[in-house]
Image (cartoon, helix red, strand yellow):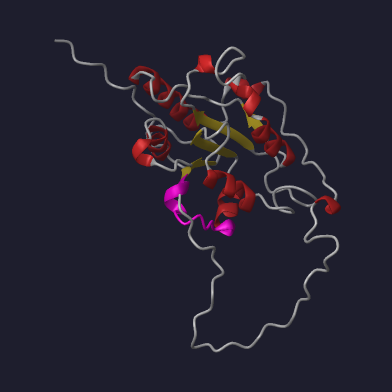
Amino acid sequence: MTEPASPPALPTAADSTPGRAIYVIVAHPRWRDSRVNRRLLDAARSIAGVDVNDLYSTYPDFSIDVAAEQQRVARADLIVLVHPIYWYSMPPLQKLWFDEVLTWGWAYGHDGHALAGKDLWLVPSTGGPQASYCAEGYNQHDFTDFLPAYEQTARLCGMRFLPPQVFYGARRSGDAALDAHVSEFAGRLATYPQWPELISMDAAPECSDIPDSDRPRCPPDVAPPAVSAPAVTDTTTDATTGARPGRAI
């Protein structure tokens, strides 16, 4: 009897050192249901020098450490988003990450250049097959039609949006297709930025300048709160952290 073929070997820490810093953010709300993203998470962790964040395990209460995340992003040349598609977009914690980490004056806007010159790479998985992403399919649009929010986020922050690596039909695909997808993903992490398609890509766009008036700190008819001197506190009591209460996932 012929033994089944083994999955292709992935690059390892010994033979795969990225040329530049990479931050992989994996966002899957239900790991027990994951077939694709768990494999990608394990593959990313096998590549030497790649910073990997399992977002739902790191922040189960949705209380994101913004300062820590900004440090990890600032160190990276390539930011990778790995997640299943939820209602033609990203899972809720990944969206919250964007809302809280990519702040005005740091990631975009006047003097917000922390992401300038970096690359953003999306590695999503879909439940529907590729044939469903067309005018005749039940999604009625090509998958690229659902990417403008990612593309414009990258552009506004001065990043290049790299061609996504999409895995279609996650629940019904064969093992060979998944093995090939994971192998390609790991290979790209190991060889970045030496990707053939990057040679012909334009450089990252200049960060878009946005008038301060388009990002008001408070409603225009409400004066900003006065800044008072810090109150003297009893040092025997614990200081409050101001952390957001946990939310149900």
Is residue 85 rendered magenta in the image?
A: no
Q: Closest to the observer: 7 or 126?
A: 126
Indicate left or right for 249 with 215 as reference. Answer: left
Along the line of sight, the residue nearer the viewer: 33 or 18: 33
Q: Residue at x 60, y 18 (%)?
A: 140
Determine whether 105 is above or below 207 in the image. Answer: below
Judging depth in this view, the residue of 128 and 80 nearest the camera is 128
Q: Relative to residue 150, is residue 108 depicted above or below? A: below
| 113 up-or-down from 14: above or below | below
Q: Position of residue 87 (x, y in %)?
A: 55, 33
User: What span is colored magenta in the figure?
Assistant: 53-67
Whether residue 60 is in magenta: the answer is yes
Quarter of the image that includes the N terminus? top left
Question: Can residue 235 be seen in this snapshot?
Answer: yes
**What residue sits 36% from the left and 36% below the top?**
33
Residue 185 location (% of width, % of height)? 46, 28
User: Relative to residue 111, is residue 86 drawn left or right?
Assistant: left
Image x and y of residue 32, in percent? 34, 39
Q: In the image, 178: left or right of 199?
A: left
Residue 240 picture quarter: bottom right
- The residue at the point 54 percent across, 63 percent down is 244
- Residue furthest top as drawn: 1
